Amino acid sequence: MIGGRLPDREWHRAQDVPDLWWADAPLSRAGLPITGLTLHQAQLLAAGLDGRLPTSPEWEWMAGAGERRYPWGQQEPAAEHANLRGHGPGTTTAVRAYPAGRTPEGLWDVAGNVWEWTSAPWRRDRAVLLRGGSYNSLAQYASCTHANDVPPDLSSPGIGIRPVRDTPPDTVSQIGAPR
């Protein structure tokens, strides 16, 4: 469960972020992140798991608690932290492959490997925000405050999904479910 107060940033005003239960890694199949989904498809998948996509400020709080530069801390990204351009094989890797890149709260692959969809509010131009960077992203995109605006109908092998829940997960269905 992660929540708190997020300061003003480029992409949003200061706001309270509720306590939420997060998937501990991007959703995966056969160990690799699920990719190639449009925003709508990602929303449907999250809803099918009794979750939702986080808002961009919620994602930013999860990544850095309002104080960390990168999910793991202040240290610049290196090969042991995340699958980023120049630090990985140039394609997605198995989730949970970078233990040094975990957040202090224990969340995996917050930076690198795949961008993560966030939900509305929509901008006037209908663009939505991706967070976290992918295997093809420069290291600067791994920062907790960086966001990338894209059209909602975009799909890519570099975009995944990390659902969130507003209420505690059902203890019967823990496999691959948000926590």
Image (cartoon, rainbow, N blue to C red):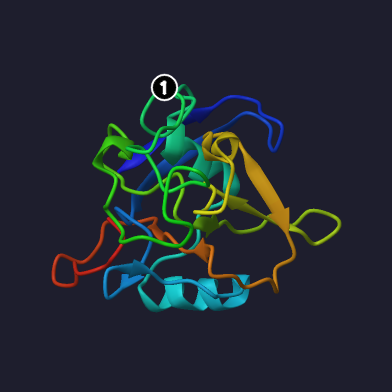
Please give the count of numbered marks on the rendered protein: 1
Q: Residue at x 36, y 37 (%)?
A: 81
Residue 24: x, y in percent? 29, 53
Give the camera-side residue of 65 and 142: 142
Quadrant in the rendering for residue 113:
bottom left
In the rendered image of this protein, does residue 18 appear above or below residue 16?
Answer: below
The quarter in which the C terminus is drawn is bottom left
Q: Residue 63 sits in which quadrant? A: top left
| Residue 60, image x, y percentages | 52, 39
- Relative to 41, is 176 above or below? above
Q: Quadrant of the N terminus?
A: top left
Residue at the (30%, 45%) spot, across then down = 107
Q: Could you tell me the amino acid type at mark 1?
A: Gln
Q: Which residue is mark 1?
A: 75
* Secondary structure of the residue carrying numbered label 1: loop
Q: Where 63 sits versus 33, above or below?
A: above
- Give the percent coordinates (x, y) of residue 56: 59, 47
Image quadrant assignment for residue 162: bottom left
Q: Tag 1: Cα neighbours inside 10 Å, few (<14), some, or many (≥20)?
A: few
Identity of the residue drawn at 68% across and 71% down? 154
Tell me the residue at 53%/47% (across/down): 85
Q: Name the outermost residue toward the left.
A: 172
Residue 171 is left or right of residue 161, and the answer is left
